Image (spheres, helix red, strand yellow):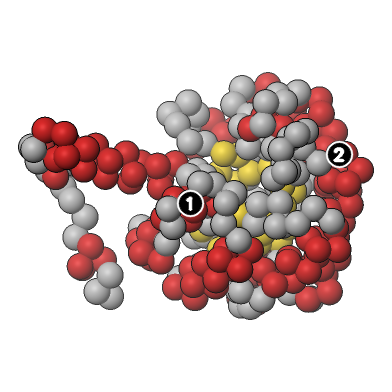
Amino acid sequence: MSSSKIAAFRRLHESGCFVIPNPWDRGSAVFLQKAGFKALASTSAGFAWAHARPDNKVTADQVLGHLEEIAKAVDIPLNADFEDGFAAEPEHVAANVTRAVATGVAGLSIEDSKRDGGEPLYAFDLAVERIKAARAAIDKTKSGVLLTGRCEAFLVGRPDIKEVTRRLEAYSAAGADVLYAPGIKSKDDIAAVVKAAGPKPVNLLIHGNWMTFAEAAELGVRRISVGAALAKAAWVAFAKAANEIAEHGTFNGLSPAGPAPNLNATFGG
């Protein structure tokens, strides 16, 4: 682990607002660092797609290897999308969080959505215990890695802002350093989450042109991530060009509008 990256990551959360974009491989991570971003966050979906898997269908070992590769590839902090901790039981979440800290990440998130079907969210009390376990595991490492508590209600068909804020308040009390409710979009919902978080920073997911950086900052958001949106944008362009060749035998998609990045120069040092 890098204490300097962790310290830098903590400073970013102390005031103002910053964007933490989501690379899906080593190349996209290096590109984003060279573009001037001060921190990065992994994307579970982007990583899964790059390995021909659907989101949430990769193993803990695969993700841990990915996190280590990205953390070593860049000189800026990396926050890990650590899904549900790859376990249901708090003690197993703690064990996996300990392994995640060892990859060199500066932060990680634990979400409350389940993998096994049925009710989409972990029961409230268990969800809180899982955050407590993650907090204890991080504290035991003495690393200072930041813990983000995520309430996935809006992403899994439970768009109840009262339940979201109830859970986030509990996650905060359980030791989360950052609060996050992906899927919220309205200014009222964002303001409610910021209020529930109190002095703790809030991460907002923006994956479309429905809010600007300035508007999010005005609402008190401290950190903005884009989730799988950058990976999806790359896949959209790729799929459009590939399907055009396969279906029509034409190659217009290989000449995208605007100047292409000079990747040889970007990755040449």
Which residue is at 26% across, 66% downward?
266
Q: Nearer the viewer, residue 216 or 52?
A: 52
Residue located beneath label 1 in the image: 53
Instruction: Point out residue 252 in the picture as x, y percentages from the top left corner.
Output: 10, 37
Instruction: Point out residue 41 in the picture as x, y percentages from the top left corner.
Output: 54, 56
Which residue is at 71% across, 61% downward?
146
Type of amino acid under label 2: Ala
Is 96 on the left or on the right of 241, as rendered? Answer: right
Q: Nearer the viewer, residue 193 or 242?
A: 242
Count of numbered labels shown in the rendering: 2
Q: Are marks 1 and 2 in contact (CB under 8 Å)?
A: no
In the rendered image, which quarter is residue 32 located in?
A: bottom left
Type of amino acid under label 1: Arg
Where does the N terminus fall, quadrant-wise?
bottom right
Outermost residue, left side: 250
Q: Is residue 22 above or below residue 74?
A: above
